[in-house]
Amino acid sequence: MTLPRPTPGVSGATEPVRRPGTGRAVAVLVLVLLAALVPLLGPSTALQGTGEAAAPGVGAVALLRTVLFAALCVPVGELFVRRLLRAVPGAPDAAPRGWAPYAAAAGFVAALGLASIVATGNAVPGSITEIDVGGLYESRDGKLALVEVNGFLAAGLCTLSARPATQVWPLAAVVVAEALRAHPTTEQSPLVGSGLTLVHLTCAALWAGGLLYALRMLRRWGPSEAGVALLGLYARVAAVLLAAITATGVASSLRRMPGETILEQLTTTAYGRVLLAKVLLVAAVAALALWARIRLGRAADPLTAYSPARAEVVALGVVVAVSGLLTALPVPIRW
């Protein structure tokens, strides 16, 4: 939005003045819309030529799960960075306003949408009358969906309370429920799969959400030694998180696509194609993280690491969208 401002020396002339942050807000909105296209248009692209059939409403499921994952990353990252601040000497008291209440609201809506799909027999409901709320208590998936709905609701209430840090417990319940949901009891060694997903999802939320809030913190502080210290501390922890994400991701992939068939399934199944896209994206994110780490340690101005770190957080947003799509696609058959 622009406001008219008189131009000195020219009576009645005006020139537009852009409000601070408007361009950034527009850029964020464009990125969000582009990320939404991944789960909405991705299923048809990934399934083309595979002979596989997706469940009804796969695009809606992928979009809702993308929102759910993003809603987890934001508050988990804020809690994580605030914890890191305790080890940063001379950290300013100024901090950006937390987005956790908004994330909890978005997560609640997404979880409610997913629960309504479960209550309609895993199909997008055409009307409210088709939703069997009572049926949610009679199935494993229904109970887990209710845990996620209540988890985000409780997290939102915690963010508005005198002790917002208590939101960690309902958020943990959401992560556990999502890990259990991803591995039904009919799967071989479901608890092993749930454990891998639990670690993978937790580390991913810490990495993506933590980087987002750290960059917001640096922008609020401006050039300072505390900002360099915070980014360096985050980078060291992020290296461990990346190692855990890689290890659990590889293990989960090998459980669903045996080693002797994984190369073929990466190109002939929808799940494999999206998984391959996710691997390439994570590799690009890792390269950006390494670039930022090198700048942080060797550049004359360590805060030049801000640019590759900002590109890294954008790429991580795309990874979240691809992950949401991946969970909605049919799991490949073990050959």
Image (cartoon, rainbow, N blue to C red):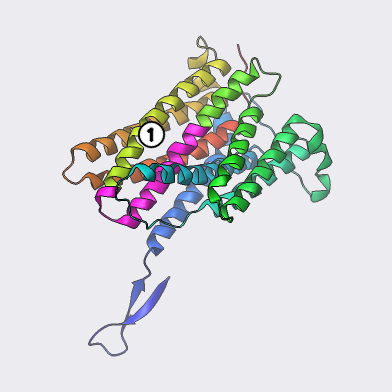
Q: Is residue 212 above or below residue 204?
A: below
Which quadrant would residue 230 be assigned to in this image? top left
Percent across and percent down for residue 1 are 43, 70
Out of 193 and 277, give the one closest to the viewer: 193
Camera-nearest residue between 102 and 85 = 85
Left or right: residue 193 versus residue 90 is right
| Residue 70 located left or right of residue 283 | right
Stretch of the chain drawn in magenta: 202-226
Residue farthest along the bottom direction in this orientation: 11
Q: Is residue 313 above or below residue 223?
A: above
Instruction: Look at the image and tell me in which quarter the C terminus lies.
Output: top right
Disc 1 marks which amino acid?
Answer: Ala
Prevalent SS, magenta region: helix
Residue 310 position in % (x across, y down): 35, 46
Residue pointed to by mark 1: 238
Residue at position x 72%, y 32% in the image: 141
